[in-house]
Amino acid sequence: HYSPEASVKVTLLNFAITPEGLQDQMLGIVVAQEQPEMEEKKRELVRNNATCTKKLKDIEDEILRLLSADGDILESTELIDMLEYSKTTTAVINKAMEESKETEVEIDLVRTSYRDYATRASLLFFCVSELLVIDPMYQFSLQWFQQLAVLGIKSAPGGECPKTRLDSLVSYFTYSIYQ
């Protein structure tokens, strides 16, 4: 705890990772390794959604700027043109956003199939992190853990079906942590 004078002058950040946050990271890692095209689609959707949202915000800001300008808003051809542009652009963006929502549901369904792996990996990370209490020698970084996860995914035996592969990933990674 810091004095009020110090708290006013600095911003305190908590870099602790949460189990849910680590699960999401591990989910991204396993999907990127197992089905890279799905993870790339997910990233592309996030980028496109951010671009569309920014474009809508820019249009909104421009309309507000034109509305606050001096003069008669009914005679402003620039405002009328911007409103027409806004109408067509918003329709296109809304259609694209609807399509991206459908695609995102499909991608999330694939990602969800690896949720057991991500949950186990997150649990194992926090177990390994607690070894520090036993002896300071047992300090492990998140980067090390993620590299170990990638190595485990690449080294785990294949499976006939997705369920078998998932079971293989979970058991192999658990085994590799304890080696």
Image (cartoon, rainbow, N blue to C red):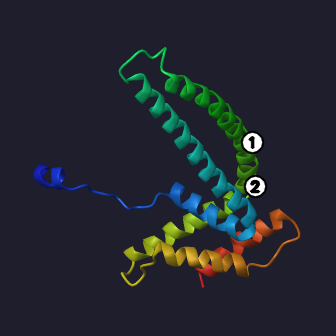
- Kindly identify the residue that appears in the image at 53 percent across and 61 percent down: 22
Tell me which label, 2 or 1, sits earlier in the chain.
Answer: 1
- Kindly identify the residue that appears in the image at 70 percent across and 73 percent down: 171
In the image shown, does 31 or 175 lie closer to the viewer?
A: 31
From the viewer's perspective, is residue 84 above or below residue 179?
Answer: above
Residue under label 2, please give it.
110
Q: Which residue type does callout 1 highlight? A: Glu
One can see residue 28 in this view: yes
- Kindly identify the residue that appears in the image at 62 percent across and 75 percent down: 149
- Kindly identify the residue that appears in the image at 40 percent across and 76 percent down: 132
Q: Where is residue 11, by image quadrant?
A: bottom left
Image quadrant where one finds the N terminus: bottom left
Q: Secondary structure at mark 1?
A: helix
Q: In the current view of this chain or complex, which residue is farthest to the right?
A: 160
Question: Is 56 displayed left or right of 172 in the figure?
Answer: left
Residue under label 1, please give it.
102
Give how far across and how far down residue 145 sits, in percent: 54, 75
One can see residue 175 in this view: no
Q: Where is residue 137, by image quadrant?
A: bottom left
Q: Which mark is residue 156?
A: none
From the viewer's perspective, is residue 101 above or below residue 119?
Answer: above
Q: Which residue type does callout 2 highlight? A: Val
Q: Where is residue 123, by image quadrant?
A: bottom right
In the image shown, does 149 or 96 lie closer to the viewer?
A: 96
Q: Secondary structure at mark 2?
A: helix
